Image: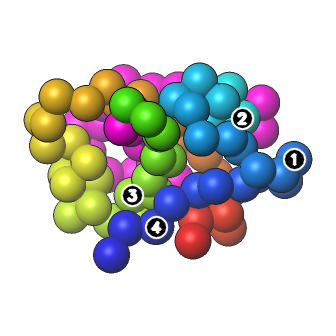
Amino acid sequence: MSKFINQTPAGFIGSSMTSKCEALLSEGAKEIQEPTRFQSGLVCVVDNTHFAAAGYADSERQMNRFKQPDGRSKRWFQWDKAIVYAE
C-alpha cells in the first residue's frame, strides 16, 4: 500500500501539484531527476488533473511502481523527513 505526504512541519501542503512541490522545497526537499536506483527519502509528486499526490517510495518496488509510464506529470524529490510525514 502506498503512503502519501499531506503535511510538513508547516502544516497541510494543499492539493495541487504546485502547492505540494513548493511545500516540499520550502522544507528542504531537493528536486531530483527520476531516480535510476533506490535511495531513502524518495517522494514522487503525481499530477492527477483535479488533485496531486505526493507519494513516498519506501522501497525499490514502490519506486518502480511510481516510475511506470502512465501519462501523468511527475516530479521527484529526495527529502530526509519523508518517512516521518508519510501516512
Q: Is residue 25 above or below residue 85?
A: above
Image depth: mark 2 or mark 3 in front: 2
Helix, strand or loop under label 4? strand
The image shows residue 76 at horizontal and vertical percentages of: 43, 34
Does residue 28 appear in the picture of this structure? no
Q: Are marks 1 and 3 in contact (CB under 8 Å)?
A: no
Residue at x 58% of width, y 65% of height: 86
Residue carrying label 1: 10
Give how far apart the Cα atoms at labels 1 and 3 are: 22 Å
Q: Amino acid at mark 2?
A: Ala
Q: Which of disc 3 and disc 1 is earlier in sequence?
A: 1
Residue 53 location (% of width, % of height): 47, 46
Q: Quadrant of residue 6?
A: bottom right
**Rounded to the nearest whole Å, what is the CA distance between mark 4 and mark 1?**
19 Å
Looking at the image, residue 8 lies above or below residue 26: below
Q: Which residue is mark 3?
A: 57
Q: Which residues are magenta?
A: 25-48
Question: Does residue 57 appear to the left or right of 63 in the view shown?
Answer: right
Disc 1 + disc 2, Cβ < 8 Å: yes
C-alpha separation, residue under disc 2 versus residue under disc 4? 17 Å
Circle count: 4
Would you name the residue on which mark 4 appears? 3
